[in-house]
Image (tube, rainbow, N blue to C red):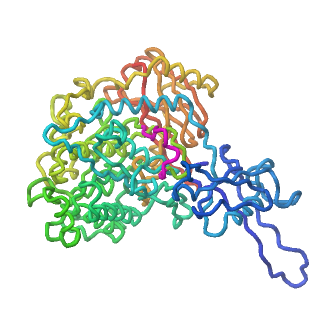
Amino acid sequence: MSRFLSSRFGLSLVVLGAVLAPGFACGPAPAPCPPAEDDAGCTGQRWISIGNPSAPCPADSLGIWAEEKLFKGPVGGPPPALARYCVYEWTGARVNPGATQCLPYGANGPGDDEINHLQTVVTAGAELGEDCIDTAPLGFEEDAAGWARKSLTRRAGGVDSLAPSAMDPTLPRPVRVVAVDTSPDALSGGIAVGQSRHGDTVAHVARDLACPNTEAAPCAAHVTTALGLPREDLANPLVTSPAQGGFFGTEGDLAQAIERSVLSFRTEVAAGQGDPRLVLNLSVGWEDDPERNNCAPAQLAQNPDSLAPPARAVLDAMRYAACHGALLLAAAGNDTGGPKPPSGLVCPARWEVISTPDAATCDALVGAKFITAWAERWPSFPRRPASAQAYDRVVYAVGGVDYNDAPLVPSRPLARPRLAALGLLAAGWDMSSNAAVTPNTNGQPPTAPPLLTGTSVATAVASAIAAGRWAYNPAATAPEILDAIYQSGVVLQQNGSNIRADPDTCIGTSACAVHRLSLCRALGVPCDDAAPVGAQNDPLPNPALSSTLLATLAGEFNAAIVSQASFPDTLPLPSAGHPTVAASPWTFPQPNWPACPACVLAVDGPNNVILYARPGVTMTDLTLVIVDRQGIVRSARVAATAPRNDALRITITPQTGFSVANARSVWLSGTATTQSGSPVSVVQQIAVTGL
């Protein structure tokens, strides 16, 4: 099912009565059937409900649906958080055999009568959603996810293990990292898997780096999730999905999630439990709308109260977190396309211009009870730095770079902050033996998620690096940790000169050179994370695919749709015609969804390349864009329509005089359609192998 659509149930209209005009004896015309289900993976035959964890699954007395608990659990049964899940499978029987009804899933699937009957079976108040078969990942995607995971870990300065401190054997002391994103709340521990895999991917990227041995000691972070984007249907914006997570949210949603994260943290501190330090990962953002004052009104740094109430609620929640000693990191934002693409940082990353409240204001926000509890529990750990001790901001923006330390493409104008981290081709998920029965999986199997590219990934990498440094230095404050990982990072250069942050992204400090953060450098241990000298002008050195992985790729795409395309394409890029869905006033992940979860461009000679693609959304005008080392952009229209999940194998022959070996970066551009019929663009940088 398209990510723009919610699960289908309760769509039919029941006519309870009608008043007829005098002289008319016929009944009312039946309501028209809604559109048929358009996703082959959604058959209507399997549904999951959330109900009373202490009771058996409600049984269907008519035998239309067969029921069982979704999770089996250990001896004695699963915990309540899992016991509430029931799965229902259609037996093939009909409520009214032979009667006319809408058949959204075709003649071989349940009709509206059966779906409506199921809703009565699971009882009022229970949640119900279709368990679609969302096209199982190709073996290549599974293998490529592991490849991408290892590659990101290496280039982000990952380490094989964390050693106990020689000075203090109690170190590293884990830091609490909360990914405030699309995943359901799991603030008591663990990473929740939601219907959007963005949130758990971001969280697992952070955990992979901070905890090389998963969460076994020694580990630098306890990574959890908070649902900041709980909404799933643009046509029904008041509906939220706390159990399964969402795809987008409002500013108020984000504010509430930040507060919940802080309340959970302070409750544990007051109880003498938990972690002493808190990192909030905000891989989300929204665009500035001057008419709404929702992001960057004039004189924002001097007058933050000029923000509209919803945005101000987010800012105050962030201040509340910072006053508790938290470090907040936010995604700088990605290119949204369109004829007039926005520039500058998205919010809340743009609020790096705002200082953290002074000590008196923070003490008032935190309250005497927590201050006392903190002093008793962590007497040697200052909550906040002394005045003017460090570059102290309410949030810090993080930009993304590729394996050459160049900005991700297509790059967002005027949105390069001084903090950079690897943001290309990330994958992360729980591979432990008990992953399917942990209380935070919410009914979703822990399969490999799509590969993500964007400043979301870079922010997660930065959060892990901050946690790693903090775990060994718990007496340092958040601004001091931020300064330490910045100073230890790689100074990015171009043509021998330091690259400086874009205007308005670095205010309040003279240290505005762009540094790529690195975990091994932050920990002061040997590193193997450097990009080649002068790499920004060289072809993109993506991690090499093994011969086995290449063979898997070729084999699984052997039966794919085969076509050819040629450079140059003279039509405008699709992403230049329409903005992405993330350009709306809603708060979206950064990126909001991968256009192609595991696409690879394989070089098949000096002038030929083969695009292996399985789009994550149905696109028209799918276009391959190649940028060479001189910055020249070439594009080829590779498919008029690229259906979601359909495999494509397209051979592209460039124009004479152009060598694929000169490719600097490669990305895909296409056009998708929202549920309401609005065209939106999708863009994504992809991997290249064979250079």
Q: Indicate left or right for 663 with 299 as reference.
A: right
Q: Position of residue 246 (x, y in %)?
A: 49, 56
Please, what is the dominant secondary structure of the magenta stretch?
A: loop
- Of residue 583 and residue 36, the one placed in the foreground of this image is 36
Q: Most extreme residue toward the top, as rendered?
A: 605
Find residue 181 and report its horizontal and vertical position in percent: 41, 54
Q: Is residue 194 above or below residue 621?
A: below
Report the residue that reaches farthest toward the bottom.
22
Depth check: give the residue in front, 129 or 472: 472
Q: Quick one: which residue is furthest to the front in this view?
A: 75
Q: Which residues are magenta?
A: 427-440
Q: Is residue 166 left or right of residue 419?
A: left
Which image quadrant for residue 168?
top left
Can residue 88 be found in the magenta stretch? no
- Residue 327 visible in this rendered orientation of the protein: no
Picture layout, residue 551 above or below residue 433:
above
Viewed as shown, does residue 227 lie left or right of 319?
A: right
Q: Is residue 229 above or below residue 542?
A: below
* Front-lying residue, 21 or 548: 548
Looking at the rendered structure, the number of numbered marks drawn on it comes to 0
**In the picture provided, is 558 more to the left or to the right than 476?**
right
| Residue 167 shows in this picture | yes
Percent of width and height locating residue 299: 21, 65
Locate residue 614: give its quadrant.
top right
Q: Nearer the viewer, residue 376 or 428?
A: 376
Q: Residue at x 36, y 46 (%)?
A: 456
Find residue 483 and report its horizontal and vertical position in percent: 16, 47
Q: Pick the quarter of the image with the C terminus.
A: top left
